[in-house]
Image: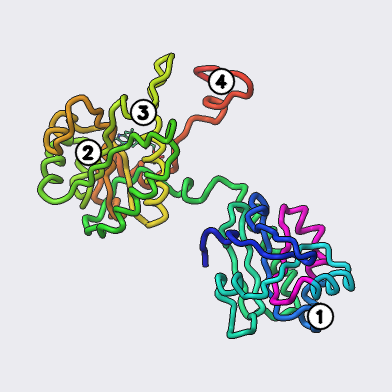
Amino acid sequence: MLFRFGLKFALSNKDGQLVELSSLLGRYVVLYFYPKAGTPGCTQEALAFQKHLARLRELGAEVVGVSPDRPQTLQRFSAKHGLEFLLLSDADGVLAEAYGVRNGRRVERSTFLLDRAGIVRWAWRRVLVPGHVEEVLATVEALAQADREVNGLIQARRAKRALRPDPIAQEDIQRLIEAAHLAPSCFNNQPWRFVVVQGEKLEAVKRALPGGNYWALKSPAIVAVASHPDLDCRLSDNRDYFLFDCGMAVGFLMVQATQMGLVAHPIAGYDPIAVKEALGIPKDYVLITLVVLGWPGDPGELSDKHRELELGPRVRKPLSAVLGWNSLPKEGT
Ligand SMILES: Cc1cc2nc3c(=O)[nH]c(=O)nc-3n(C[C@H](O)[C@H](O)[C@H](O)COP(=O)(O)O)c2cc1C
């Protein structure tokens, strides 16, 4: 299960003060629902969270217990057992409802692990207390370590060329554009213009591809990305930001495509005049790239060179060639 905005709520703490869950953004949140403070199971669970609290905090995690109890009850519960983590009163069951753990007037014992961005990454439903907190701790340890790796979708993305020509649903293509459209841009100018090309127009665009991009002929849809310098910030020192911002948008599109199992491969190899003409894009616009879309296909159908690239490791310069600390890296290293 994975849903966003898991922290868009405010509930009372044991002192009756309203706590915005969003104030926990930037930390892992172990959000656990329990039915009733003071009962044996809930006490045992709370004590187990208290026992492991220091280690959880070391990992950047905060524990939040949620129950239908009134603040005064939470006050007593917390004082009696020396609980140092946040206890929230969900008397109306709003949070339990949102997390789908409200069963009539009862709350199902369950735990959600939210990441530093407030996204639910793990869920335990119908929790049995013995061993549960230890399992949560192990999951936080693993997640904290995994989240410090380079993002998995960024690692998985490749400029693949082997395509299956099966159609891509309109709504899937639209989702890619929605992701692209969430990119940041200078002054929020959103200079990107996307033309989704299918059908007869697609054939016209394919005629504008050079032989080297033969593999793109299998694509069921191509996204043309166009813009104009006047659509974005133009600052001194030749800082025209339209290309930069469109590049970020395409980056977002590619990450989204990777998540959806699609290939999204930007190319520069096409006749821009012919494509602009075919799509009615004004001459003074820059046709920045064509993003070739498709489902991953059979690498056996590629040229020897492309098959090798497709199946081979990713090629990058060493990091020292592109990264300098406090000064530019030396060229040619
Ligand atoms: C702006 C741009 C233009 C590209 N043009 C082409 C192209 O015309 N044909 C092609 O086969 N690949 C093209 N590529 C793909 C690159 O060759 C590829 O991204 C690069 O080799 C790195 O491989 P990777 O994306 O799998 O890490 C282009 C990529 C970008 C970003």
Q: What residue type is labelled 2?
A: Asn
Image quadrant assignment for residue 193: top left
Residue labelled 1 has its Cβ within 8 Å of some atom of ligand 1: no
Q: Reply above or below: 331 against 249.
A: above
Q: Distance between the residues labelled 1 and 4?
A: 61 Å
Image quadrant assignment for residue 243: top left
Q: Which secondary structure lies at badge 2?
A: helix
Q: Where is residue 277 in the image (x, y as percent from the top left)?
A: 12, 33
Residue at 89% x, 73% y is 80
Q: Mark 1 points at which residue?
A: 38
Q: How crowded is mark 3: few (under 14 residues within 10 Å), some or many (20 or more)?
A: many
Count every numbered label the image shows and give the total.
4
Instruction: Report if the CB atoms under discs 3 and 1 are less than 8 Å apart.
Output: no
Given residues 234 and 11, the one toward you in this image is 11
Q: Distance between the residues labelled 4 and 2?
A: 34 Å
N-term-proximal mark, 4 vs 3: 3
Which mark is drawn over residue 329?
4
Instruction: Report if the CB atoms under discs 1 and 4 are less than 8 Å apart.
Output: no
